[in-house]
Amino acid sequence: MSAAIPRRSRPSRALAPRVRTEKRSRALIVLALIALGIYALDQISKILVVDLMTEGEVVRVLGEVLQLHFVRNPGAAFSLASGTTWVFSIIAAGVVVFIVWFARRIRSLAWGLVFGLLLGGVLGNLTDRLLREPGFGLGHVVDFLSTPWLLPAIYNVADMSIVSSMIIFMILTIRGIGLDGERVVDKPKSDAPKPEEPTSDEPKAEIVP
């Protein structure tokens, strides 16, 4: 009698949901920490600027490379579309709701970083629009960072966070990285024709002992 060959143990399929849950939990933790960090940095920096500077004041930190220029922006990021504050308040609130709803699908640390940066930045500017003068939903966003050699605009930490999230988003998309962190690769199609099965009319070869 031939000895039975032991089969190699394969990972149980029951572990797959557990692995997905662990990956999702790590991604959500990264998203939350990044969002909270960006939000705190944005709000603290704005509070310091409002307390220590007068509106319109310019402080040359590194000459034309980096300047602090305190302005109040009623428009979108980088002082664009002034006069439509309420529209951007509604859009920002919708983005926050979408991220919170969509976050459960993320199982990648990189995508957690993307949505964490986006959430923190959107919340930072939304807080200004909701709580600052002249009124709820119409508040002006505090901008204070200026780099004349790079951009003819004044922005803040929240704006930088939003732009950074978009850059990383494009990199991940171009590289084909899915929400689970795996690279999406198209399976190559085989060009070789499949062998034809003999029909009942075709003679079958007989094996002679």
Image (cartoon, rainbow, N blue to C red):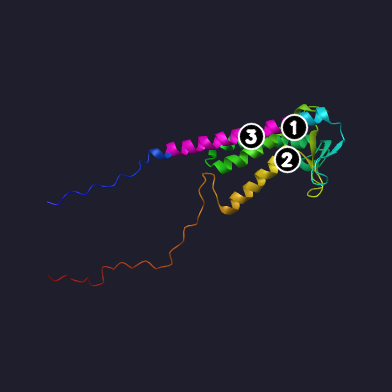
Q: Is residue 202 magenta?
A: no
What residue does disc 3 label?
35
Q: Is residue 17 left or right of residue 148?
A: left
Please tell me whether mark 2 sits on a helix, a strand or a loop. helix
Mark 2 and mark 1 in contact (Cβ < 8 Å)? no
C-alpha gap between disc 1 and disc 2: 13 Å
Q: Is residue 105 left or right of residue 61?
A: left
Residue at (52% x, 36% y) in the render: 26
Please tell me whether mark 3 sits on a helix, a strand or a loop. helix
Amino acid at circle 1: Ser
What residue does disc 1 label?
45
| Quarter the C terminus occupies | bottom left
What residue does disc 2 label?
159
Q: Residues within 10 Å of mark 3 (few under 14, many from 20)?
A: many
Of residues 56 and 112, the one drawn nearer to the viewer in this rendering: 56
> What secondary structure characterizes most of the magenta part?
helix
Q: Which tag is nearer the camera, tag 1 or tag 2?
A: 1
Amino acid at circle 2: Asp
Q: Is residue 102 left or right of residue 136?
A: left
Q: Which residues are magenta?
A: 17-44
Residue 94 visible here: no
